[in-house]
Amino acid sequence: MQEKRRKLYHKRRVHFLLFLLPSLAGVTLFVLLPFLDVVKRSFQTAVTGEFTGIKNYGVIFQNQAFVLAVKNTARFTVVCIPFLVLLGLLVAFPLSTFKEAGVVKSVYLFPLAMPTATIVLVWKMVFYRQGFLNLLLTRLGEITGLWGEVAVDYLGTGASFWVLVGSYLWKNTGYTVVLWLAGILSIPSEFIEAAKVDGAGRWKCIRYIILPNLKGSFYTIVILSFLNSFKIYREAYLVAGSYPQEDIYLLQHLFNNWFVNMEFDKMAAAAVCVGIVLFGAIMLLQRIWDRAD
């Protein structure tokens, strides 16, 4: 009997490994091996390939552009993720009670289908010095008599950071709402009905029934939002080019400029540092998630 169970376990294990093999092969070939090559290049010169030890790492941490890009990217991530998670949850709660929630979800997902170039064109038309926002504010000032002409260059001042934040929230709120909705609608209605029978009001149901059952959705949303926050570079690059206003000078701008200048050694060292930070952040979130369970 034990021999039969052992054979069955071995067979299932082989099937499991065969099932994972294509995925593991793809990850190894297209992710792990290239990253190992980047790690190797981070200890070499860009042209001759001469071994330099940790010199490249010392250079990037003394580079003002790298420090600025790290600071802006970290600031953007810290600001955007809480806003996005909370905004999606606040929209998903009332939406979960609608019978036509599917149609509304399609509307929220529409920004994801918009080409980035189109979105950038809209931001330019709205936020430039002669853009629609300034024209609207100027008109309101004329009507009310409270202020004169408004000619703020939102994309050329510190306000550009908040324009970028708004762009990120506008584009990514849709999938966040959908994920929150999926989590809310998957909660058995019997739980909430039983709580109401015991005298729990709406807020107590949300606090003690709904929110504890949304931990899986919360973890998924945070991870996706964290990774997507690094994709906002496209909008910033198309709006302001390789050297934008310093408040929206991100790591991706720096990598692009180093690539153009063929400074591959510094780019490799910076990529390794960023990869380690991303991996550490994800592992930390996973640990927090495991403890919460």
Image (spheres, helix red, strand yellow):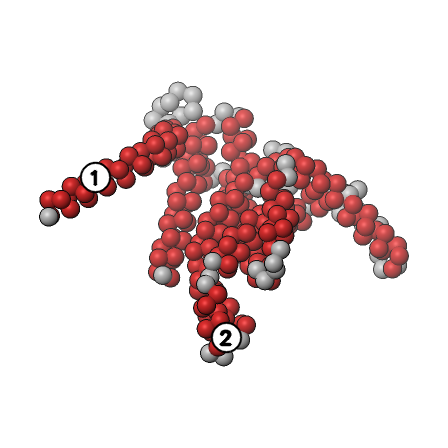
Residue placed most toward the observer, 117 or 199: 199
Which residue is tagged 1? Answer: 11
Which residue is tagged 2? Answer: 196
Residue placed most toward the observer, 107 or 192: 192
Residue placed most toward the observer, 276 or 122: 122
Contact between labelled residues 2 and 1, with CB atoms less than 8 Å apart: no
**Residue 181 at what x, y percent from top left?**
53, 56
Callout 2 secondary element: helix
Q: Which residue is drawn at the image coordinates 43% and 56% (left, top)? A: 216
Residue placed most toward the observer, 9 or 22: 9
| Kind of residue indicated by mark 2 | Lys
- In this picture, is 44 found above or below 277? above
Q: Which residue is drawn at the image coordinates 48% and 77% (left, top)? A: 197
Q: Is residue 140 visible?
A: yes
Relative horizontal placement of residue 47, taking residue 131 as reference (left or right):
left
Q: Which residue is drawn at the image coordinates 35% and 57% (left, top)? A: 290
Relative horizontal placement of residue 55, taking residue 197 as reference (left or right):
left
Q: Residues within 10 Å of mark 2 (few under 14, many from 20)?
A: some
Callout 1 secondary element: helix
Query: Residue 73 got which mark?
Result: none
Q: Is residue 164 visible?
A: no
| Kind of residue indicated by mark 1 | Lys
